């Protein structure tokens, strides 16, 4: 195992849940972290937490739907630290509903953030990594990127897309540019993800599910990301499928 001292990481969706916990874990492992999202006040709070533990963080206001905002965020991080070694493409949302409810705006939002946002961010960071001839990209898929669930058709489509893109990206940039790619596929994690469900039935279903088993915590996913990031340079942990023990 190497450690992450001096490595520079950019984490999208770092204002809550998995992203916030991952940024904190990366900082504890020695990385300097760019913490990116739209809710600046949450990022400021996380920066204070990281600094209180002796870590270093840059707050980056970023909307992954807006390429100009990503370009500006990436430039801010590179100007501050001179490189980007780790990208955690984590920003995402999951408003569940049945297709015949025709919540088309929510479908588009999921495609825009979960898929296009991830592609936008990759496109902005990859040239830096190619220049450096090293880097590690983590893409947040889900158990919903491995199988399909009722009420999650569009979400599953986005997370399958992330898994397919990750595999293709890994094949292309590993050998050619010495860049590692890891696709992360968690089961249920206790975060704000479920707060955005507008369908009352599915909202209740998720609340009930959280009473039936112990969900993962964001830190559990952060730990697996640090594990893969710390693997020896010739090792690419291509997939991390991380489940609560009690989830079927
Ligand atoms: P949260 O809702 O807690 O976090 C989502 C994050 O995404 C927030 O920080 C939010 O920040 C950010 N985000 C949303 N839209 C945008 C945008 N347009 N631009 C930039 N950032 C954005 O949920 P999780 O931590 O659970 O979700 C993180 C990832 O993990 C998602 O991709 C999700 O699909 C995936 N996942 C979650 C699982 C779970 O059970 N919780 C299981 C498997 C995968 P802000 O609003 O401040 O911009």
Image (cartoon, rainbow, N blue to C red):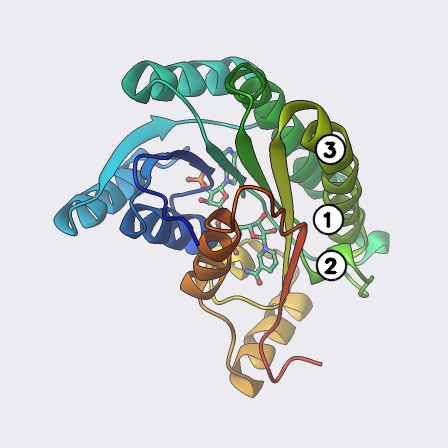
Q: Which of 170 and 175 is in front in this view?
A: 175
Give the number of the mark in front: 3 or 2: 3
Q: Which residue is drawn at 59% across and 68% down?
A: 188
Please provide percent x and percent y for residue 212: 57, 86
The label on residue 238 is none
Query: Which of the two discs, 3 and 2, labels the residue nearer the N terminus?
Result: 2
Query: Disc 2 versus disc 1: distance between alpha carbons?
Result: 6 Å
Q: Which of 228 and 9 is in front in this view?
A: 228
The label on residue 159 is 1
Query: Which of the two discs, 2 and 1, labels the residue nearer the N terminus?
Result: 2
Q: Which residue is drawn at 46% across and 66% down?
A: 220
To which residue does mark 3 refer? 169
User: Which residue of the protein is positioned furthest toward the right in this rendering?
Assistant: 100
Position of 223 with respect to 183 (left or right) is: left
Query: Disc 3 versus disc 1: distance between alpha carbons?
Result: 15 Å
Label 3 sits on a secondary structure element that is: helix
């Amino acid at each position: 195992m190497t450690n992450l001292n001096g490595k520079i990481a950019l984490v999208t969706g770092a204002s809550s849940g998995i992203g916030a916990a991952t940024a904190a874990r990366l900082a504890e492992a020695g990385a300097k972290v760019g913490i990116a999202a739209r809710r600046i006040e949450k990022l400021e709070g996380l920066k204070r937490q990281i600094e209180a533990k002796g870590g270093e963080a840059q707050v980056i206001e970023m909307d992954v739907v807006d390429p100009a905002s990503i370009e500006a965020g990436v430039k801010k991080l590179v100007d501050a630290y001179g490189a980007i070694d780790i990208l955690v493409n984590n920003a995402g949302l999951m408003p569940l509903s049945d297709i015949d409810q025709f919540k088309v705006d929510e479908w588009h939002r999921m495609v825009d953030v979960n898929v296009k946002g991830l592609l936008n961010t990759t496109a902005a960071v990859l040239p830096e990594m190619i220049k450096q001839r090293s880097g590690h990209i983590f893409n947040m898929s889900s158990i919903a990127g491995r199988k399909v669930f009722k009420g999650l058709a569009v979400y599953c489509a986005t997370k399958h897309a992330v898994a397919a893109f990750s595999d293709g990206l890994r094949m292309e940039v590993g050998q050619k540019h010495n860049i590692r790619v890891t696709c992360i596929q968690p089961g249920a994690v206790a975060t704000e993800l479920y707060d955005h469900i507008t369908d009352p039935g599915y909202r209740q279903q998720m609340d009930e599910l959280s009473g039936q088993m112990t969900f993962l915590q964001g830190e559990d996913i952060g730990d697996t990301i640090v594990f893969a990031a710390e693997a020896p340079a010739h090792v690419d942990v291509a997939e991390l499928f991380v489940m609560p023990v009690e989830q079927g």
